[in-house]
Image (cartoon, grey):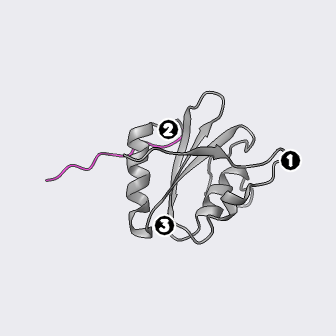
Amino acid sequence: MRDLFYRPVCDRRGEFLPWVNALANRSGAYVIRAQSSRRTLYVGESHTGNLAKTVKRHFYPWRDDPEHRHNVYDRRTVEVAIRLTPPTTAVGAQDNLIRRLDPRDNELVPVERPF
């Protein structure tokens, strides 16, 4: 299995780094973890070519739609790893990472069993 490469998402001023913006029009899975403890906090995916936007949403609260709650993290205290995939395999990559990393803030992903 390929190793994940974690890196900060922002500079000292809190601005997103260029590598985050370069995820526009890409699909794949991502892992957010605490820098200090290296504890995996959340694993997500984008299969619609909106990986940059999907990652960034975890650093802004949504105030206008309470039904679409999500975890919000301090961009200065976390680091993110990306696994780029074709759109058709992003969800599977996310599910595999959830099972492997046991993130604090994800719901349990059931293991698929053949009939």
Label located before the other in sequence (3 or 1)? 1
- The answer to whether marks 2 and 3 mark residues whose Cβ atoms lie closer than 8 Å is no
- Residue type at mark 2: give it: Pro
| Residue named by callout 3 | 47
Name the disc covering residue 13, or none.
Answer: 1
Asked where in the image residue 56 lies, by quadrant, the reply is: bottom right
Q: Is residue 19 left or right of residue 51?
A: right
Separation of residues labelled 3 and 1 (CA atoms): 30 Å
The one nearer the camera, 22 or 78, is 22
Residue 66 visible somewhere in the drawing:
no
Residue at image x 64%, y 45%? 7
- Determine if the magenta segment contains residue 7: no
User: Could you say where residue 58 lies in the image, as x and y percent from the top left?
Assistant: 66, 51
Residue 42: percent from the left, percent from the top? 55, 43
Q: Residues within 10 Å of mark 2 (few under 14, many from 20)?
A: some
Q: What element carries label 2?
A: loop
Foreground: 28 or 73?
A: 28
Magenta region: which residues?
Answer: 105-115
Q: In this view, does 71 lie above or below 77?
A: below
Alpha carbons under labels 2 and 3: distance apart: 20 Å
Judged left or right of residue 106, residue 61 is: right
Residue 73 location (% of width, % of height): 68, 43
| Residue at (71, 37) in percent of width and height | 77
- Count residues near mark 3 (Cα–Cα under 10 Å), then give few for <14, some for 14-19, many for 20+: some
Give the Cα separation between the discs numbered 1 and 2. 28 Å
| Residue carrying label 2 | 103
